[in-house]
């Protein structure tokens, strides 16, 4: 984990400095934000490998920051808060947090959780480097095949055109990101002079094929932008 970037978002200077010291001692690079707006700026500019995010923050709350991050990134996020309510914990996890630590905590506990989440993320990235999965859907990037598995049934191959396969792989690689039609066109038909609206026809056909195999409502239209994988 040497050299991994950790963004600490904490408005308590003492708490932030203690976490920073422990993280640096373990070989991490650390940046600190004391409010929600600064956290979003650093996330966009610095590209951390993990975010330690306090819930109660000035300017923008931790849940707002998390929701904004999840619109464009799958970076691991550990929520850190003094609120130990179960509904608050479940709410943060629903927003997309990877783990949750309640104050008062031991810095060693936070450090252990940080290592654990980064390990899980690294292992998932290694496994998923050539295979993408969502529920029963499996996309093999090497074989360029997509299949759907149903309970008590063998996988059924999706009959996709090369363009439909490229479109599905592009969206599934970053499921939280909204892609413009221009981005999708460039990824799926890089040498084509086709109009951006051609993407709509390919998405329509891809939706129909996924629906026929029981994968429903995963290709979401983002108004005035394009599409994302739900």
Image (spheres, rainbow, N blue to C red):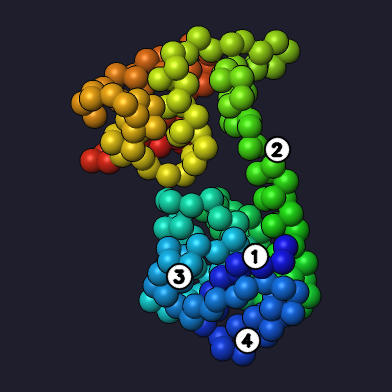
Mark 2 surroundings within 10 Å by alpha-carbon count, few (fewer than 14), some (14 through 19), many (20 or more):
few
Labels 3, 4: front one? 3
Label 3, label 4: how far apart the Cα atoms are: 17 Å
Name the side, left or right, on which 102 lies relative to 12. Answer: right
Assess disc 1: are there few (<14), some (14-19) or many (≥20) residues with their C-alpha within 10 Å of its C-alpha.
Answer: some
Q: Say which of marks 4 and 1 sits in front.
A: 1
- Return the residue found at the far bottom: 14
Marks 3 and 2, the one that precedes in the sequence = 3
Pointer 3 and pointer 2: residues touching (CB < 8 Å)?
A: no
Q: Earlier in the sequence, mark 1 or mark 3?
A: 1
Question: Can you see residue 213?
Answer: yes
Quarter occupied by residue 153: top right
Q: In this view, does 31 lie above or below 189?
A: below
Find numbered disc 4 in the image and state the secondary structure of the residue it sits on: helix
Q: Work out how far the residue at label 1 is from the one at label 3, CA to CA, in angstroms.
A: 15 Å
For disc 3, the marked residue is 42
Residue carrying label 4: 17
Secondary structure under tag 3 reads helix
In terms of depth relative to the viewer, which is nearer, 167 or 204? 167
Q: Which of 146 and 221 is in front in this view?
A: 146
Label 1 sits on residue:
4
Instruction: Please tell me how many numbered marks the rendered image carries.
Output: 4
Distance from Cα at disc 2 to Cα at disc 1: 20 Å
Residue of label 2? 127
């Amino acid at each position: 984990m040497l050299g991994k970037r950790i963004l600490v978002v904490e408005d308590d200077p003492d708490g932030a400095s203690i976490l920073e010291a422990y993280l640096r001692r373990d070989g991490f690079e650390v940046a600190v934000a004391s409010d929600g707006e600064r956290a979003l700026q650093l996330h966009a500019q610095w590209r951390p490998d993990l975010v330690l995010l306090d819930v109660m923050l000035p300017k923008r709350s931790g849940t707002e920051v998390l929701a904004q991050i999840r619109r464009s990134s799958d970076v691991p996020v550990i929520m850190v808060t003094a609120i130990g309510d179960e509904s608050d914990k479940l709410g943060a996890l629903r927003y997309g947090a990877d783990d949750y630590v309640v104050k008062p905590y031991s810095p060693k506990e936070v450090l252990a959780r940080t290592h654990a989440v980064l390990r899980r993320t690294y292992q998932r990235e290694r496994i998923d480097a050539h295979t993408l999965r969502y529920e029963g859907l499996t996309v093999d990037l090497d074989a360029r095949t997509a299949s759907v598995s149903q309970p008590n049934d063998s996988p059924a191959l999706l009959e996709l055109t090369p363009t439909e396969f490229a479109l599905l792989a592009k969206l599934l690689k970053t499921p939280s990101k909204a892609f413009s039609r221009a981005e999708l066109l460039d990824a799926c038909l890089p040498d084509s002079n086709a109009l951006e609206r051609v993407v709509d026809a390919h998405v329509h056909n891809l939706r129909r094929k996924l629906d026929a195999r029981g994968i429903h409502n995963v290709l979401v239209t983002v108004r005035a932008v394009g599409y994302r994988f739900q």
